[in-house]
Amino acid sequence: MDLFVSRLSGSAASNYYTQQSIGAPRMATPVANSPARTSAPPAKDRRGFLAIVLGALVAIVPFASGLAVFLDPLRRNGRGGRFVRVTGSDAVPADGIPREFPVVTERVDAWNRSVEPIGAVYLRRTSEDSAPECWSATCPHAGCFVAYDGETNSFKCPCHNSTFTVEGQVIEPSPSPRNMDTLECRMQGDEILVKFENFYTGKAEKIVKQ
Amino acid sequence: MKRMLDWFDDRTGVRALVHATLYEHVPGGAHWRYVWGSTLVFAFATQVVTGVFLWMCYSPSAQTAWESVYYIQYEMQGGWLLRGLHHFMAQAMVVLMVLHFMQVIIDGAYRAPREVNFWLGLILMQIVLGLSLTGYLLPWDQKGYWATRVATNLLSVVPWVGPQLQQLVVGGSDYGHLTLTRFFALHAGVLPGLLAVFLVMHVAIFRRHGLCHKQPITRPDCMFWPDQVLKDAVACLAVLAVVLLLSLHPSAWLSSHEGAMGYAQLGAELGAPADPSSQYSAARPEWYFLFLFQFLKLFEGWGEHGELLGAIVIPGAVMLALFLMPFIGKWKLGHRFNIGFAACLLLGAGLLTAAAVNEDYRARWTSQDRFADFTPVFEQLGQDNDKIAAHFSGQPEKATEYRRRLEEYESYRKSQEYLHAVEEADQEAARVVRLARGPAQIPVSGAITLLRDDPKTQGPRLFAAYCASCHTHTAPGDETDLAQREKATGANLYAFASRKWIAGLLNPKQIGGPEYFGHTSHAEGTMVGFVTDTLAGWPAEEVSQVVAALSAEAQLKSQVAADKKDAEPIEAGRKLIADGERCASCHHFREAGELGSAPDLTGYGSREWIVGMISDPKHERFYREDNDRMPSFANNQDPARNTLSARQIGLLADWLRGDWYEPPAEPAQAAAK
């Protein structure tokens, strides 16, 4: 683009029009007398070039304005990373069995703000005095929700068959590239708070989705 | 007339255009194998027509997408047919595309000078698949939502730009309004527009080179009109007939549980509205993408490269190979190689699809008896490697056999779970439609609110999450979850406060049993003693009066008629309960008796009573310090600190009381009965 502009304002103007006597009507100059007579194509070339540049310009402006709006989601971040109250501690007995809870919190969907379930977590406690362990219910492979299977005491994904131990360790061979995603979890009095985050799926490391 | 046509032709040249369109030379005469291209054009035209009409009724946003599709499907006249045509024609289009592709490969029509047209065809194929992928999300039902989540999550493994690409496609970091607006713009604008442009080029270049006929020509040539057009028209009619047949059949004929829908659902399926917090184990892509879905499962244990290979690299390489076919075809054996390659692809996709279907549906054609001898051993050993090794020590072949059976059993159970999830999803879909058709209709917040506020849907979930570690909720004679029931420490709350339930409570044989106080600290308490010692001596009529009167306190929906009919015995029962020598000696009931020693019988089993009991069983109205292990789910002044919200407790109470909306029986159904 810069290249086009410099050609327009610089070289084109200085080469051709300066050869005309200033103030004289351009059309009045008989082409036959012009030095460009034998090399008429440059004038034509320039007109063609100008037409292309202008054509591109009028095409680009509407497209670029649309593109700006289209790319808008890239600069918006999610609202993850806050501690959210998930349940009371009574709801997670210290029996080592994972239990699923929805995470209900404020959610912004473009122009709407609402309080609603935004995901689900598994909580599991092996002793009364410690905070529960917490995993996101989202499978790290492709994002389905894993289900806890009591009969085999393991987590199973209903989509592509990834399986995890009750501690969230991936059981090989599984399509999942990593263990289930742990989430930070702490107790506040009788309440269980979880720092709810989403992670990119299909990657070996756990990368937070902003 | 002729003058008018002449005038018009003079200005437009329309005759030459029509002539050029219809009088295409067909060397060797019309053939059935030339029809595929025309059927595809017909399919596309059908999609444009039905799509535009659907567009007139569709509203792409998270609160209106499902709702508007519901309205088309269930309320608008002929809506189901319009959706059915659009849905099944999309599937027919994929099938026709494969047939067209195979025809081109077999006839060698991809070779010089038709290379460019072959590439245009491949691009068209991508566009059609893109249309199908974007269209699947638009109803915003559970199926489309979860399948699209998987499909877009795969984008994030694209090297370097994956996450940004995903964010752009999804329209943010989460799925919502902007996902729908984007997918809809792609589905109804960008992709059909591109398809039309590429189709025009495809047909123009096809006309330039003419039909790729077989050598030697054995029959006389003919013109496109009318011979080939007739054959094309017949083929299009056949395609339309198949699509209509698929749309006219209730989708239930594909599954074994027609009863779940309540009324026949015609046309395309519509699942329950998308719920990002609700596990949906039945998420599957459209059937013609199943092979890709199954393909991903093959990359077990490959780590993150597996997904990249399975979802991006290999499909990309296959596509590249297809694009190179015209060059490969130049070699001596190239054409045969191409045919073989295409056939292998088709066969591979077919096998993968069959494997995917078998994995999901095998429980339907496998009998449970097959595992009769295996399950006892399994219950002992499970998947514990140490236990297996110890059990089969010295018999390695038996251990291997066990592991083989274990694998078989696991896949059987997985299939069972899938079928169960499908059935549950169907029931949920049927339920939300019943609610939406009810007098309340759909609130502005969307149909998902209907399900979230429905005791029939939420009750079992809340009960399973918060109550089922102690209580059971099983109808008499129900044999499921026996193991779970043995662990139960609380009462069976099925039909709580109904006459039957209270009759059991006041039955000396039952009150101390597992269904009532048997496993609680009240097993040998005052009430059990009273029922076994004193109440056993009452005349049966008085007991039944007390049962009727106490149950009437609950004002259950199921007992309205019975309560009205038995007004006299209920009045007599109330007097007995209020008698200071009888119930009221411990219990408070209306004006009689005092609080402080036993649960209040006023309004026993009513919504208000159950809500109070769940909120705080230690309250003086209920069990005070005698409360046995039941947590107080909502006894905090600050509602945010309670385990259950007032709304959740209300849902539980309504569900326990069987108090939820049911539509009046459909006329058709009633007539059938």
Image (cartoon, helix red, strand yellow):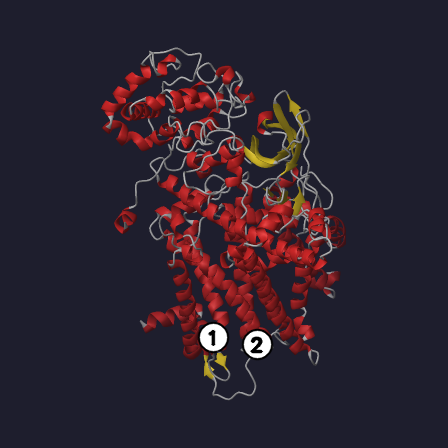
Q: Earlier in the sequence, mark 1 or mark 2?
A: 1
Where does label 1 land, which residue?
B20
**B85 lies above or below B561:** below
Q: Which one is closest to the eye, mark 1 or mark 2? A: 2
**B489 lies above or below B328:** above
User: What chain letter is assigned to the residue under label 1?
Assistant: B
> Residue B480 versus residue B431: which sits nearer the camera?
B480
User: What chain letter is assigned to the residue under label 2?
Assistant: B
> Residue B194 versus residue B141: which sits nearer the camera?
B141
Residue B474 visible, this angle: yes
**B580 lies above or below A32:** above
Q: Are marks 1 and 2 on the same chain?
A: yes
Where does label 2 land, which residue?
B209
Report the Cα–Cα distance between label 1 and label 2: 14 Å
| Residue type, label 2 | His
> Residue B368 versus residue A164: which sits nearer the camera?
B368
User: Which image quadrant: the N terminus of chain B?
Assistant: bottom left
Residue A157 visible, this angle: no
Q: Position of residue B503 (x, y in %)?
A: 35, 29
Q: Where is residue B257 in the image (x, y as percent from the top left)?
A: 42, 52
Please identify the quarter of the rendering in which residue B405 is found: bottom right
Compared across the picture, whether B321 is left or right of B615 comes to right
Compared across the picture, whether B406 is left or right of A12 comes to left
| Residue type, label 1 | Ala
Q: What element carries label 2?
A: helix
Q: Position of residue B568 (x, y in %)?
A: 23, 23
Label disc, if present, on residue B188 of the rendered structure:
none
Residue that appears at 71% across and 41% down? A206
**B602 lies above or below B325:** above
Q: How would you rate the neighbour count of disc 2 (Cα within 10 Å): few for under 14, some for 14-19, many for 20 or more? A: few
Compared across the picture, whether B631 is left or right of B553 comes to right
Q: What element carries label 1?
A: helix
